Amino acid sequence: MRTYIGGHQAVSVNDFIELALGTPAELWLGVEGETGEERAARLDAARDILADNPELPDDVTRVVAEVIEAHAPELFNVVPLTRPVGLRRPSRKGAAA
C-alpha cells in the first residue's frame, strides 16, 4: 500500500516528518559531522523559513503533541512512578499560615 500526502509519496518515517513540517528534519536538528560553515548556513536557512512562516513552531508543537498523545506507550514505554508511603509529603492541614 502506498501513502501520498499532498501528491508526494511518503515511504519512510522521515518522509512523513518532512511532509508534516514542510522541511527536512535535518534542517532543524543538524547532521553528525557538519562543519561550522554548514551549521551556519543551515541555521540561516531555518531563520529565513521561520521569518516567512512564523506559525510553524506552533504547528510543529501541535503535531508533536498529537503524536505523543496517540503513541506515548509504544514511544516512551512509560511506567507511572509512585512514592513509597514513608516518603509522602506531610499534610499542610496543621501547618501555620
Image: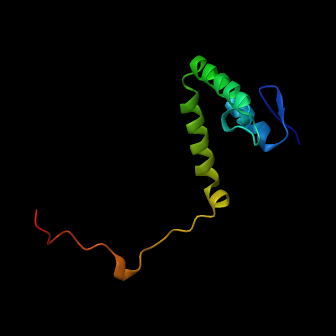
Residue at 63 percent across and 21 percent down: it is 49
User: Which image quadrant for residue 43?
Assistant: top right
Say above or below: 31 vs 78.
above
Residue 14 lies, with reference to residue 97, above or below; the image says above
Which residue of the protein is positioned furthest toward the front in this rendering? Answer: 36
What residue is drawn where x is 74% and y is 34%? 35
The C terminus: image quadrant: bottom left
Rendered residue at 57%/44% (across/down)? 65
Q: Quadrant of residue 2?
A: top right
Q: Of residues 77 and 70, which is closer to you in this image?
A: 77
Q: Is residue 34 above or below residue 8?
A: below
Residue 74 image offset from top left, x and y in percent: 67, 60
Residue 76 seen in this snapshot: yes
Vertical position of residue 24 compared to residue 86: above or below: above
Where in the figure is residue 79, as x and y percent of width and height? 56, 68
Residue at 58% over, 64% down: 78
Residue 23, visible in the rendered structure: no
